[in-house]
Amino acid sequence: MPATAAPTMPPPALDSPAGGAFSFIFTTLPALLRLTCGLVGAAVALSVRTPPVDEALLLPGVAALTGWSVWYAVRALRHGIGPALVAGDVAVTVVACLLIPRLVAPEVLPGEGSWIAVLASTTVINAQATAKARWSVPVGLLVTAAYVAGAQAAGNVTEAQAHAATLLVQTGCTAMMTGVMRRRIGRADHAFAEHQRVTREALVARTAREAERQQNRDLHDTVLGTLTMVGLGAVSGPSASFRGRCATDLRTLVAVTDLGPAPGDGPVLLDERLRTVPDRLPELPVHLELTACAVPAGVADAITESAYAALSNVVRHAPGARTTLRLNRDAVAVVVEVVDDGPGFDPETVPAHRYGLRESIRGRMAAVGGRAEVRSAPGAGTRIRLEWPGVG
């Protein structure tokens, strides 16, 4: 009785691959944007220190902003961007905006070119990309209000209005873009998860069907074969070999219900496996022509049991026929042949419901990537060729 093939495990489900890619991109880009803005902004801020810029406030402020930008980038790249990081970034930006009169020279403020204007835009864009709209849009409005207040306090109403409009447009456009992307990505992940579910269910169903077919093959080749011999009158009286066959069939019935772990699929000697097959059919003399050959254990099981099924057919349908079991290998395939000089038959006339050739031989070989070919004709004997495309 061959060991039942181990069920194929379904592939592990990937958890939101599109969402994961979105999070990676919209974590890396804001981190790099904040770091670049912080370093460049610090250099620009220190380059123009004409009154009323308060150097006593500017120098520690620039140092704090630079340190924050570096920490923000490192924290974001290592752990992602959470609400606390967004809130801290907004707080730093709002304070900087309110201090425009003491941090930015009047000649730099117009034209939306000051370092604090760039800081405000960066914060607004990052917030929309990293937080949900119900939080990011109010953040954009808060930063805009702080910038307007600071610019007006510095005496430049025109700049306050101009950059306020820019900040509002950045808030709206970035929020809509990320919102659409999140919805699309959510749908993609949902479709992917559904595909994974269907794939797993199909694989489980296929594994269950194959297990059932394997059990049917085992029963057909043992218990049902024995009962067929009894029904055809092939057993006329007490027989030690028949008792041995019945004992083997009983072990098969027990093994069919054994759900223990399956053995590994390491290489085994196919010729040694095939050499034991005639021992299971003592009533049939078999001439062996076996070349040494190693194949995976699962393949050896399939070929051995297919050969046994073919020899069992000889016992049932061509008793007394001269029978040969051959094993050869070449650079392309492993080939096993069961040849008898019995009465033969027409393979085209075999009813579709007959299980032996269809499942016990062809089905078994197909399950391991092999094939089976039956050549026979009335009065010309039978040749069953089992082929597996690999060598040991």
Image (tube, rainbow, N blue to C red):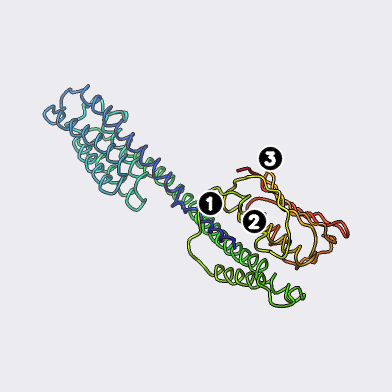
Task: Estimate the x, y position of residue 99 in percent, counting from the top left.
Answer: 18, 36
Dot 2 crowding, Cα within 10 Å, few <14, some 14–19, many 20+: many
Label disc, if present, on residue 330 of the rendered structure: 3
Mark toward the start of the polypeptide (2 vs 1): 1
Q: Which residue is mark 1?
A: 265
**The C terminus sits in image quarter:** top right
Q: Residue at x 50, y 56 (%)?
A: 263
Disc tally is: 3
- Report the Cα–Cα distance between label 2 and label 1: 15 Å
SS at mark 1 in the image? loop
Label disc, if present, on residue 348 of the rendered structure: none
- Report the Cα–Cα distance between label 3 and label 1: 22 Å
Left or right relative to 136: residue 254: right
Q: Which residue is mark 2?
A: 304
Tag 2 and tag 1, C-beta contact below 8 Å: no
SS at mark 2 in the image? helix
Left or right relative to 174: residue 106: left
SS at mark 3 in the image? loop
| 143 versus 356 height, above or below | above
Q: Amino acid at mark 2?
A: Thr
